[in-house]
Amino acid sequence: MANYLNWMGIVLIHFTQQIFLRGVAMLERKNDESENKQYIVRLMGEEYLIRGNDNREYVDTIASYLDDIFKSIASNNPKLNKSQIAVLAALKVADEIHKLRQEYQYLDRLLAEAE
């Protein structure tokens, strides 16, 4: 059971990283795709190399947002390990994305009906 939970933690850490790197694509920002930039960000005390087309300020904003979630979860649950914190953060961010998608679809329908 412990190995399964550890494996799930690794999978969900990866999922959290994917949310961080790609989940915000639904906001339909325009990126300068002519450049492939890389930055180092610190999350839960660990450094991660992030590659993409976003500017440094945007990457720092997203990293700070995610790290704030990690810190909030860790401070409210001091016995959790990093994998457990990452799992809870992934669920929180996935919930936020899901709710935003629902709201976007609702507003899109209202706009379509108004036209």
Image (tube, rainbow, N blue to C red):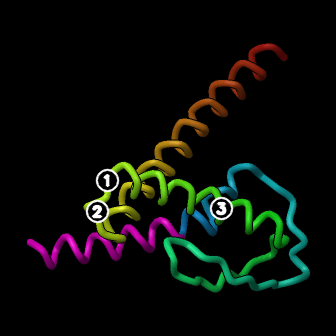
The residue carrying mark 3 is 64
Does the CB distance between marks 3 and 2 fall below 8 Å?
Answer: no
Q: Earlier in the sequence, mark 3 or mark 2?
A: 3
- Please state the horizontal and vertical placement of residue 60, each as a whole percent of the image: 74, 67
State which region is magenta.
1-17
Q: Earlier in the sequence, mark 1 or mark 3?
A: 3
Residue 3 is covered by the magenta coloring: yes
Does the CB distance between marks 1 and 2 fall below 8 Å?
Answer: yes
Q: Residue at x 74, y 68 (%)?
A: 59
Amino acid of disc 2: Leu
Q: Residue at x 81, y 75 (%)?
A: 53
> SS class of the residue under badge 3?
helix
Q: Residue at x 45, y 67 (%)?
A: 15
- Please state the horizontal and vertical placement of residue 5, each as a whole percent of the image: 19, 70
The residue carrying mark 2 is 80
Amino acid of disc 3: Ser
**Farthest residue toward the left?**
1
Q: Does residue 30 sit above or below 99 in this rendering?
A: below
Label 1 Cα crowd, 10 Å radius (few <14 / some 14-19 / many 20+): few
Q: CA distance from mark 1 to mark 2?
A: 6 Å
Amino acid of disc 1: Asn
Looking at the image, residue 110 sits to the left or right of residue 86; the answer is right
Q: Which mark is residue 77?
A: 1
